[in-house]
Image (cartoon, grey):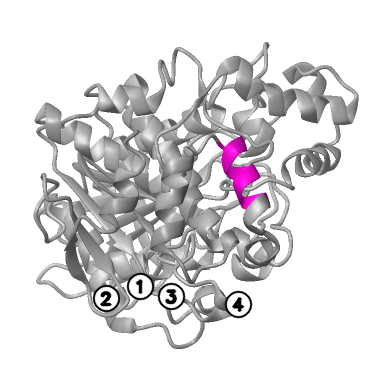
Amino acid sequence: MSESGGLGPEVRTRDGALRGSLKDGVAAFLGVPYAQAPVGPLRFRAPEPAEPWDGIREATAFGPTAPKRPYAPPLDALLPDPEVAGEACLNLNVWAPWPRAGGAEPGADGERGDLASPRRPVMVWIHGGSLVHGSSAVPVYDGTAFARDGVVLVSVNYRLGLEGFGVLPDAPANLGLRDQIAALGWVRDNIGAFGGDPERVTVFGESAGAISIAALLASPLAEGLFRRAVVQSGAPMALPLAEARRTTEAVAARLKVPATAEAFARVDRDRLLAAQTEVTGKGSPLSGGKSFQIAVDGEVVPRDPARALAGGASAGVDLLMGTTTEEYRLWFVPSGVTDRVGPWVQRLLLWKAKVPSGTARVYRAGRPLEKPGEVLGALATDKLLRIPLNRLADARLRSGAPGGTYLYEFGWRSPVLDLGACHALELGFVFDTLGLPETRALTGPDAPGELASAMHATWVAFASTGDPGWRGWDAARPVMTFGPGLPSLVEGPREAERLAWEV
């Protein structure tokens, strides 16, 4: 690692030299290829290693994002999702502390960084977006604060939608997961050049990114590529191949083509994305509908991740996981579901979701002032997220898993559109990016900086040591709550509601 005469910091990877940018002691290397562009004969194929290059590659702008469509209103205003044109979407970004010998940052005199210093912890971010949205270029995910605090931060793009998670007879399944594994392999082989420790890698992700991480924890192909994991607002889940294939078949039917990679490759990409959006656009993670999902394919994901993890897979990996208190409000409030759902519709939807009537009664009794739609949302949040994560923590406790297990909950409430402590709200706090307008779209202008400092420091501590700062999971069920107010440890929050699922 070096600073080259005012032209920006330089580093040499196994594929070639990179030149990034430097600001306030943090070097950023953006748009770095970890695999070849998935086009032509490589489309619908497992990722191939990036081709080496000669000379110095400029790495000062985000690389192309995976093909996708914007979020539908009003989520498009709440969840900024930049699109960067180009085909080489299998790229990543690195933010790293850029020390200089003697402890100062590199300067224009070209002095080299002190590579004799201890390697730094590495965090690899896998974005969410229901496996059809998102990218590493989202401003909220800027890695500067992590690098400022001594972490080498990597963020990854991977294939989305049908090209990443379609189930096809003539193509490998779970291509998006294979991309993530390829990126983690790149980190193992190259992160030392940025001052990172390949033996101290933490993967972290939110929503579909967290579901991906749960699958990676259960995947033999990812074994040994990371030491710790943070699962934010996503639970271990995957579908049998035949069930996961239904969304692929629905897109094919919309396009009037066979549900094969060969047929989809002949379809104009804009038409493909339009059909994909028509098939998946009416559902949500909480309300259901067709969606792309990780598939149990017998190779990348040999068995259902929830069962694999409960059975001891990745027992030695330190695990931090949790949810926001009111995940459902991101989908139910802007869409009007909280106001439209009355008692009869609530009961119908709970019956369709196979929620036991006794469980629903406990929630209604404990929330007498909430609307039927809000009670429905609380039940959906717990069924899909909080309860599965609690069960996984319990399974690790019973088995005596050597890896640490810690749970958190994010409860600060956003005033924007009455979204409350909704899905994705914690991201600006974790990345300590509350000052960005793209973060404020969801948090509003007055989000508490001290809470962001505390939450961000927790993630840094966990990546550095495996200890986020509170005692591990035990019979008293300790959960660190981040807001409202200052962080505090709560034992067994809403225990009556949790117990109502043990039927």
Label located before the other in sequence (2 or 3): 3
What secondary structure predominates along the stretch shown in magenta? helix
Total number of numbered labels? 4
Q: Compared to 421, does 10 lie above or below?
A: above
Residue 432 — which label? 1
The percent coordinates of residue 447 (x first, y second) are 41, 82
Residue at image mark 4: 417
The percent coordinates of residue 38 (x first, y second) are 63, 32
The percent coordinates of residue 58 (x first, y second) are 50, 57
Q: Which of 28 and 376 is in front in this view?
A: 376
Residue at image mark 3: 413
Label located before the other in sequence (4 or 1): 4
Q: Residue at x 35, y 83 (%)?
A: 448
Label 2 to label 3, Cα distance in Å? Answer: 17 Å
- Give the extent of the magenta segment: 345-353
Q: Nearer the viewer, residue 34 or 153?
A: 153
Label 2 to label 4, Cα distance in Å? Answer: 25 Å
Is the residue under label 1 in contact with that under label 2 (CB below 8 Å)?
yes
**260 lies left or right of 319:** right
Label located before the other in sequence (2 or 4): 4
